[in-house]
Image: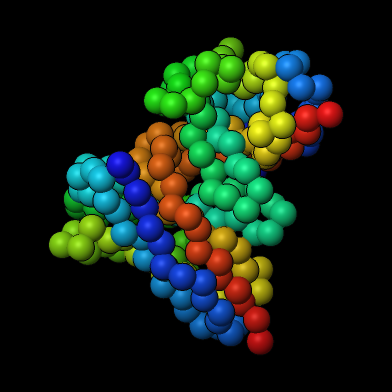
Amino acid sequence: QSVLTQPPSVSAAPGQKVTISCSGSSSNIGNNYVSWYQQLPGAAPKLLIYEDNKRPSGIPDRFSGSKSGTSATLGITGLQTGDEADYYCGTWDSSLSAVFGTGTKVTVL
Amino acid sequence: QVQLVQSGAEVKKPGASVKVSCKASGYTFTSYDINWVRQATGQGLEWMGWMNPNSGKTGYAQKFQGRVTMTRNTSIRTAYMELSSLRSEDTAVYYCARGLAVDYWGQGTLVTVSS
């Protein structure tokens, strides 16, 4: 169902950096803003990044977003145990449907 | 602060319908679309559709066309999502979420479809 492809999992030690890729097409990422969401176990998704690289109030600058062409990337620096969660990218499609990524599980070693 | 508070868990039999509510507070209800997204256990996020609370206009994912209806009651700042002809594969947590940026999410409503 997901039209945006993410790696199933990434991991790193505390304090290190991870990046999560999100690959789409010209009908979605290529022509629309990308958002990123963090979903802690048992919780609703929470917005981390919107409009490709903007952080809502209260989101630390350890989280960053970027986009190039039909792909987007979420970066997390200074990794903490509290960052262990599932992360999803999301955007809109030319058919006016929202689409989400396949999801990436971040593990802090 | 912006809040979306959803109705409680539901258990339904196959073939039945379910109606989930989403009460908004902390912002002007009619100024932002409401999206509905579902998530089966251990699975990813699946967008179902959107509704404009001001006009009542809706847009549904093709997968749910004919089975989903999104409505609202502006006097009580509440959006509704009704899914009919339920089957076991519809067992999931259903979320409402605000706007084009999909920025604020409700706490989720577990819908279990079981005979």
Residue situated in front as seen by the camera: B31 or B6: B6
Q: Is residue B60 above or below residue A18?
A: below
Image point 44% across, 47% down: which residue?
B105
Query: Where is residue A41 shown, x and y percent of the image?
Result: 66, 48
Which color scheme does this rendered protein use?
rainbow
Image point 47% across, 78% down: which residue?
B17
Image point 37% across, 37% down: which residue?
B100
Q: Is any part of residue A86 visible from this angle?
A: yes
User: Quarter of the image holding residue A17?
Assistant: top right
- Position of A74 with respect to A104 (left or right) is left
Q: Is residue A33 above or below residue B50?
A: above
Residue situated in front as seen by the camera: B65 or B105: B105
Quadrant containing the N terminus of chain B in the rendered view: top left
Residue furthest out toward the left: B75
Image point 78% across, 33% down: which residue?
A107
Query: Where is residue B27 shown, x and y percent of the image?
Result: 23, 43
Query: Where is residue B23 shown, x and y percent of the image?
Result: 31, 59
Residue situated in front as seen by the camera: B82 or A82: A82
Quadrant containing the C terminus of chain B in the rendered view: bottom right
User: Quarter of the image holding residue B28?
Assistant: top left
Query: Where is residue A69 shown, x and y percent of the image?
Result: 58, 14
Q: Is any part of residue B87 visible from this angle?
A: no
- Position of A9 with respect to B75 (left or right) is right
Residue furthest out toward the right: A109
- Position of B11 with respect to A87 (left or right) is left
